[in-house]
Image (cartoon, grey):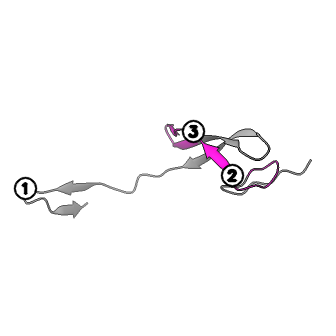
């Protein structure tokens, strides 16, 4: 069996009908569990996240990017 590895596409049947669960956050990213509504394949998409910086708001409500 040849599985695909494309975001938003079922690796089993290549349908774009993934029903996503609530995300799970990890130390380095986020995982989205899913079930394909076409072939009922169960799986997960996983993403990495990197810290970029902070934004704060001053007393006037203005956003300051650090």
Q: Earlier in the sequence, mark 1 or mark 2?
A: 2
Circle 2 sits on which residue?
A: 17
Separation of residues labelled 1 and 2 (CA atoms): 46 Å
Secondary structure at badge 1 equals: loop
Query: Does the stretch in magenta take in 62?
Result: no
Q: Residue at x 11, y 57 (%)?
A: 58
Mark number displayed over residue 21: 3
Give the magenta range. Answer: 10-31
Left or right of residue 37: residue 54: left
User: Nearest the camera: 6 or 48?
Assistant: 6
Q: Residue at x 52, y 38 (%)?
A: 22
Q: Residue furthest right?
A: 1
Mark number displayed over residue 59: 1
Q: Residue at x 66, y 55 (%)?
A: 8
Count every numbered label the image shows and give the total. Answer: 3
Q: Nearer the viewer, mark 3 or mark 1?
A: 3
Q: Residue furthest front?
A: 38
Q: Position of residue 10 (x, y in %)?
A: 74, 50
Q: Are marks 1 and 2 in contact (CB under 8 Å)?
A: no
Q: Residue furthest left?
A: 59
Q: Nearer the viewer, mark 2 or mark 3?
A: 2
Assign the magenta stretch its main secondary structure.
loop
Separation of residues labelled 3 and 1 (CA atoms): 38 Å
Q: Are marks 3 and 1 in contact (CB under 8 Å)?
A: no
Q: Residue at x 72, y 57 (%)?
A: 6
Q: Position of residue 15 (x, y in %)?
A: 76, 55
Q: Position of residue 56 (x, y in %)?
A: 21, 55
Q: Are marks 2 and 3 in contact (CB under 8 Å)?
A: no
């Amino acid at each position: 069996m040849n599985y695909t590895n494309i975001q938003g596409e079922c690796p089993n049947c290549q349908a774009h009908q993934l029903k996503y669960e609530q995300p799970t956050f990890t130390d380095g990213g986020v995982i989205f569990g899913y079930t394909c509504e076409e072939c009922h394949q169960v799986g997960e998409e996983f993403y990495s996240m990197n810290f970029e910086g902070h934004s704060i708001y001053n007393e006037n409500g203005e956003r300051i990017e650090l």
